[in-house]
Image (spheres, rainbow, N blue to C red):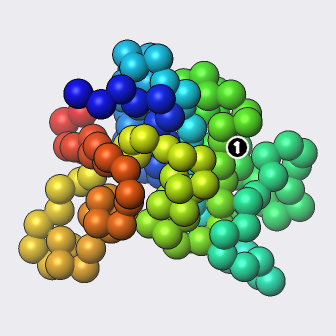
């Protein structure tokens, strides 16, 4: 078994974001690994901001929607005790930013949630599937079910 030293967990703000982060914390503690967290903003307008832009977490934002996203992200990070230096809130395409950060930070394992969609939703793709396909390190999916 691989001895993971750096783990990156990708979270969203669905009802399962906290679950995925908690699972990642458990795995990082088990391996005594450094835990990083990323959330990619892809659903709010960011005028004149190129993809790949790191959103600063210190200090308030003038944009109410962006501040709300920052607050959610910080709350999850605080709950699973991720140090501020390992928190990444980035504007862009999720699978691209997750894999880009994993290369930059020399991540050994990426953890993502997966809803295990079927049919048309599976054909259209998911962030988890794209990360698995493009990552250059191991990827673990946390299966998300409605009964969790």
Placement of 133 over or under 83, stated as above or below = below
Residue 39 visible at all: no
Query: Total label count?
Result: 1
Left or right: 56, with 3 as reference point: right
Q: Residue at x 66, y 41 (%)?
A: 87
Q: Work out whether residue 105 or residue 49 is closer to the camera in this orientation and state it.
A: 105
Side of 43 where 133 appears, left or right: left
Q: Residue furthest left?
A: 119
- Whole-percent x, y for residue 137 in the image: 37, 50
Neighbor class of circle 1 (other Cα within 10 Å; few <14, some 14-19, many 20+) is some
Residue 115, x across and y down, in percent: 24, 54
Q: Is residue 116 visible?
A: yes
Quarter of the picture containing the C terminus is top left
Residue under the image location 65 percent in, 60 percent down: 90
Residue 79 pos. (x, y %): 57, 24
Q: Is residue 132 above or below residue 6?
A: below
Location of residue 9 in the rendering, given as x and y in whole percent from the top left corner: 46, 42
Numbered disc 1: secondary structure: helix
Of 107 and 87, the residue lying toward us:
107
**Figure check: 108 above or below 79:** below
**Who's the residue at 39% across and 41% down the image?**
109
Q: Quadrant of residue 52?
A: bottom right
Residue nearest the observer in this picture, 61 or 87: 87
Identify the residue position indicated by label 1 in the image. Answer: 71
Please give the name of the residue rendered at 70% of the width and 43% of the height, measured from the top-left corner. 71
The quadrant of the picture occupied by the N terminus is top left
- Quarter of the image for residue 97 reads bottom right
143 sits left or right of 39 in the view: left
Quadrant position of residue 129: bottom left
- Furthest residue toward bottom: 48
């Amino acid at each position: 078994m691989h001895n993971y030293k750096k783990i990156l967990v990708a979270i969203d703000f669905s009802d399962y974001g906290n679950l995925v982060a908690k699972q990642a914390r458990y795995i990082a503690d088990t391996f005594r690994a450094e835990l990083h967290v990323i959330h990619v903003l892809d659903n709010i307008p960011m005028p004149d901001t190129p993809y790949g832009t790191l959103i600063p977490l210190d200090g308030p934002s003038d944009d109410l929607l962006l501040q709300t996203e920052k607050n959610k992200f910080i709350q999850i990070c605080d709950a699973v005790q991720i140090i501020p230096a390992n928190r990444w809130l980035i504007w862009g395409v999720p699978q691209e930013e997750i894999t880009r950060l994993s290369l930059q930070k020399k991540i050994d394992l990426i953890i993502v949630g997966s809803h295990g969609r079927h049919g048309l939703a599976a054909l259209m793709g998911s962030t988890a599937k794209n990360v698995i396909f493009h990552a250059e390190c191991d990827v673990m999916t946390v299966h998300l079910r409605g009964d969790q």
